[in-house]
Image (cartoon, grey):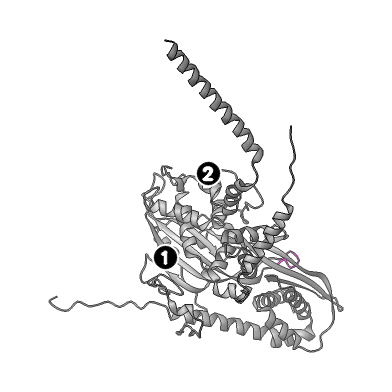
Amino acid sequence: MYVAVKGGETAIAHSLDLVADKRRGDRDVAELSLDQIDQQLGLAVDRVMTEGSCYDRSLAALAIKQARGDLIEAIFLLRAYRTTLPRFGASEPLDTTRMVAERRISSTFKDVPGGQVLGPTYDYTHRLLDFSLAASGERPEAPTAPADATHALPRVGDILQRDGLLEPPPSNDDGEARDLTRDPLVLPASRPLRLQNLARGDEGFLLALGYSTQRGYGNNHPFVGEIRYGHVPVSFVPEELGFAIEIGEIEVTECDMVNQFAGSHDVPPQFTRGYGLAFGHAERKAMAMALVDRALRADELGEAVTSPAQDEEFVLAHSDNVEGSGFVQHLKLPHYVDFQSELVVVRMLRAEVEKRREQAALAQAAE
Amino acid sequence: MSSDLMIARRQRWLSVLAKAPGARLTSLWQGLGARPSYTVLRRPEIGLVMVQGRISGTGAPFCAGEMTVTRAAVRLDSGEMGFGYVRGRDARHAEIVAAVDALGQRADWVEKLEAAIVTPLALEAEARHRLIAARAAATRVDFFTVAREAGA
C-alpha cells in the first residue's frame, strides 16, 4: 500500500525566512552591494560566470550575494536563470590575438616578443596575511609605463609552429561548433565538445585531475606555452543586419599548454598542445583545463589510457558541479520509504542469521 | 553613400556604441537636444549569445559559454530602421543604440551623430585601452644578465 504523506510547509517557509535572516547577518554591519561584490570580490564573480557558463558580472554578483558566498550554489543559481532566456545565436569565434592584455607570460620563451607582462598576479606574493587590509583606507592607483595599446601580442604557439616543432591546432572545418547545452553528450566526444564541458566544469575537479597527470597518472610533460588575460571584443551577426558587429567586450583568460610527444608512425616527434579558456581572470582554471584537455587526447595520439584524467567518460560525466552537487545533495531529501524497505530486508536477514546460529548451537549441544 | 560604405559605417557605430558604458551613451544621447521621434519595433529583449572560442586561440571553434545580450529595434517616422545589440541587460542602452543606428542612416543626422556621440565614445574606449596597456606595461619584466667577474 502506498501512503502519501504531506507536511512541513510551515517549517520550510520558516527555514527560508531564517536563510534570509542569516544572509543579512548582523543588522549593525553595512549590507553588501552588487557593485562591491563585482569590484572587490571580482575573482569570485569570474568563477561563477565561468562555471555558471554565463558572462554577466552583475548577475553573478547577485548569485553570490543570494548564496551567501557559496560559489557552487551561486553557479547553480546562474545556470537556472540562463534557462529562462531565449538564445539569439552564437558569436563569431573570439580572436584572442587582438586581446588588450592585462597579463601575458610564457614559461617556455624568456624573450617572447612583447615581453613577459606579469599583470595582476598573486604568483610573487609571499602569501602572508596583509593586516593593513583589515582597516579601510585610501589605496594608491597602480603605476603606468609607456605602452602601445594597438600592438597585438604575437602568439608563442605561432612562433614554435613555424618550425614544425609544435602541432598546429585542428582547423575550423564546419563553421559553428556543436553545443552540448542543445544536444546531449555522446561518447566519444569531439575535442570542441570536450572543451565546452571542461570550460563549465568544476575548477576543483579539474585542478585535481590536472595535478594527478603531473604526479604520474597520465603524465605528458607540460610547459606553459602562454597564458594571457585581458579584454576581447565579441562579434555577432544579427540576422536582421546580416553583417558582424561587436556587441561588447569581455575579459577572458587563456592557456596554451605545450606537451612533449615522442611521435608515432605518422607523425614525427613534436610538441602537442592542450588548451584552456575561462571567463574573467581564472588562470588556475584555464591551466587545469589545458592539462585535462591534453590528457583526454591520449586515444587520438596513440597513448595508453591508464589514468582517470585520460578517461573521457569518467572526466566528462563528473566535471559538472551543478549535476554533482544535485545528486549528492538529493540524499538529504526524504528517503523514508526506500529506507523502510531496506530496514525490512536487513531485519529479515538478521533474523535468518540468528535462526541458523540457534540451530547450529542446538545441533552442537545434541552431539 | 554606397551600400558597402554604409555597412562599414553602421558596423563601426554599432560596435562603438555597444561597447560604451550605458550611462555615458545615455547622457550623450540626451545631450543631442531635439531628436526625431521613433516607434519601438521590438521592445528591448534580454537573451543569450553563445560565445565561441578557438582551440589554442586559432583552431577550430568551440562553445566557451554564454553571455547575456539585450536587443531592440526601432523605426523612424521617415522609415529608417535601427537595431541595437548590447552585452548585458541594460534595456535603455539597447534602445538608444537602435535609435542612433536608425538616425545615422539619415544624411541630415549622420555627421552630427558622428561628432556628438560616436567619435567621443570611440576616443574614450581608446583611452580605457591605453590605461589598461599602460598599467600592464609597468609590470613588464626587464631581464638583465649578471656578468661573472673575471677569474671567478
Sequence-wise, the earlier of marks 2 and 1 is 1
Q: Is residue A148 left or right of residue B117?
A: left
Quadrant location of the C terminus of chain A in the rendered image: top left
Q: Are there few (<14), some (14-19), or many (20+) residues within 10 Å of tag 2?
A: some
Q: Nearer the viewer, residue A246 or A13?
A: A13
- Residue hosting label 1: A159
- In the displayed orientation, state which residue is furthest to the front: A365
Picture disc at residue A313 = 2
- The kind of residue on which mark 2 rests is Glu
Please tell me whether residue B68 is drawn above or below residue A301 in the rendered image: below
Q: Nearer the viewer, residue A7 or B67?
A: A7
Q: Is residue B22 left or right of residue A98?
A: right
- Please tell me whether residue A240 belongs to the stretch shown in magenta: yes
Is residue A95 at all visible to an observer of this figure? no
Where is residue B116? Give x, y as percent: 71, 88
Q: Which residues are magenta?
A: A238-242
Q: Chain of mark 2?
A: A
Please tell me whether residue A359 is drawn above or below residue A180 in the rendered image: above
Q: Is residue A29 left or right of residue A253?
A: right
Q: Are there few (<14), some (14-19), or many (20+) residues within 10 Å of tag 1?
A: some
- Please tell me whether residue A211 belongs to the stretch shown in magenta: no
Report the mark closest to the observer, 2 or 1. 2
Kindly state the secondary structure of the residue where label 2 is placed. helix
Where is residue A85? Give x, y as percent: 72, 60
Quadrant location of the N terminus of chain A in the rendered image: top right
Is residue A130 at all visible to an observer of this figure? yes
Where is residue B141? Give x, y as percent: 38, 77
Where is residue A169? Give x, y as percent: 49, 57
**Mostly what secondary structure, the magenta segment?**
loop
